[in-house]
Amino acid sequence: MKLIFKALFVILAILTSQVSVFADQFVQVNQNASATVNLNCDVIQSPTDSGYIFTWFQNGNEVILDTNQNSILSSMLTKGEIWTCKVYKETGIAGTVFIGEDSTTIRNSAPVITPSNALPIALNGAPGTPFSYDVNATDADADSLTYSLSAITPAAPILINSNTGLLTWFNPVAGIYAFSVIVSDSGYGATSVTQNYNLVISGTAPTPLSVVVSGNPISGPVPLAVAFTATASGGTAPYTYNWDFTNDGTYDANNVSSTSVQNNNVYSATSSYTARVQVTDSASMTAQATVTISVTTTTNTSITFSTSSCPDAEEDSAYTCDIDATGSGTLQYSLLSEPSGMTIDQNSGLISWTPSSAGDNTFTVRVTDITNLLSRDQSFTVAVDEAEVTNEFVFIDSIVFEKETYSPGETAVAYVTVRNEDDNDVDDLKIELLMVDSGVTAVSSEFDLMGNGKKTIKVSFDLPNELFASSEWIKFTLIGENIRIARYRALEFSGASNVFSAKSGPSELIFKPTSLPGYSAGNGVNDLNWSGIWFMIILILLLLGLAAYIVKGMADERKKKVKFTSLDEQLLY
């Protein structure tokens, strides 16, 4: 009996001691758990102990997890859920003992702006150019977000789309503007996040949008096919062109481009038409231009040309030719198939031109009686003479492009090698470049050429974005005091792909005139100077002959000076 009482006393003591230990422990979960913050369950204890069993409940339902798992990942949490953590401990003799429990409601996660920074984020824009910036924000709870702006300092009409976060300012004014964007979510425990911005508007405002339109031809007998060209400038590229070929208020065609566009129309009835083009830039600004097209009856003899021919011209020199005609009505002059750069005053008939290359140029002058809708054509040929080269010692040796293929809009690079065969230096030289058909020009920096020296000069030029010919001649002119030397390289391209190829053309066309010293083939390799080669061969032969003569003379002299004391020495010698 005594043994039984002792055993009961021991058990009672153990249970009493366990209760006193558990009384100093309690369970606690973090109250900030959300879809971005893990949920943790901790036993606050004294003294420190281990071996606890954790049981989790989600909205009152037990979640089957590892009994040692005292943390729930944020990816398993949804705002508004109630999570409870119950903790037990296995005591051995007393079995599993309940320690305590704690609960929390999962909180809402705040939106996140990307990118974000504790300091204001810098944004940039230009005066007069529409500004836009998309504020990007996300929410871990997939809540719908609302965007808003704080006060803008100084005041400015900056707008924000409350649903998308897109900032816009149609016509910015130079200055520095400070503001904040607030992104708020919705639902239980709604939160918000704020990001500060500094918008810097600097630079020069774009020039006003304008457009110029032309037609080729602007008059002629029915049916008349006209190629229109419109060129926009100012505003903000790219541009959209809408065409109304008869000015009836209905657009017949449209194009999109960053510079110029072409469009065609065929007029099948005799009349005077006003073709109109409206251009719209990316800022929704518009501009218009018109050109008058006179569609006449068949060619007639009531118009008479008083001018039958034009005088010759000189390469790279300003040229004029006055075309006179008579008729019963108001006359208008235009050109057909004219060389690049040639123009005619539509009222006076005065042709103006600066020819860029030598040769014969044939074109047609059309005179239109816009009163009676009659027209007549006549062909003219202008012979262009080559410009004089007044320096016989300076030459262009070769012209080589940096790469073999270029695309429209690229920057092309050419290397021009120049040679000086005189003993004296040649100073203040430069190289001018001209794309003969497109009119693109470029010029190198000035350079000096040492006596009997050679130098390679780099010339860069921007190719047009659009070209409508099958090939293009590039003219390189070396210019200095009493020096003007022109050489050519061909630049061809495929009309289908608009890809340029820097290829050589016929050798007689690449450099003009070919009789000048310094002519080289299209690939930039110098032609052999046969006169110089023969001169060197003859000079070498003469030097060899002279050397042989000197050696023979020295041998003869040596024989004269030798003295013999016996017949045997003479025989041995």
Image (cartoon, helix red, strand yellow):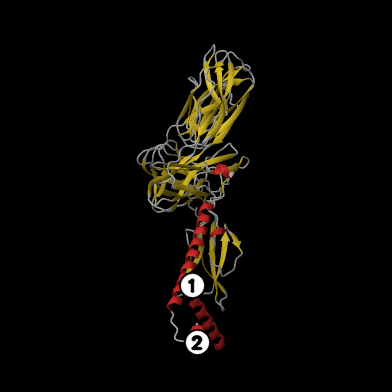
Tell me the quarter of the picture where residue 554 sits. bottom left
The local secondary structure at tag 2 comes to helix
Q: Which quadrant: the N terminus?
A: bottom right
**Above or below, comparing residue 541 to residue 335 in the picture:** below
Residue type of the residue flagged with mark 2: Asp
Q: Position of residue 68 (x, y in %)?
A: 56, 70
Residue found at the far bottom of this picture: 2
Q: Which mark is residue 568?
A: 2
**Above or below, comparing residue 423 to residue 306 in the picture:** below
Q: Distance between the Cα atoms at labels 1 and 2?
A: 140 Å
Disc number lying in front (1 or 2) = 2
Is residue 491 visible in this depiction of the protein?
A: no
Q: Position of residue 112 (x, y in %)?
A: 48, 52
Between residue 197 and residue 11, name the one nearer to us: 197
Q: Position of residue 432 (x, y in %)?
A: 45, 42
Residue type of the residue flagged with mark 1: Phe
Between residue 470 and residue 198, name the one nearer to us: 470
**x 57%, y 57%: residue:** 59
Q: Which residue is mark 1?
A: 22
Q: Sort mark 2 into few (<14), some (14-19) or many (20+) by Cα contacts within 10 Å.
A: few
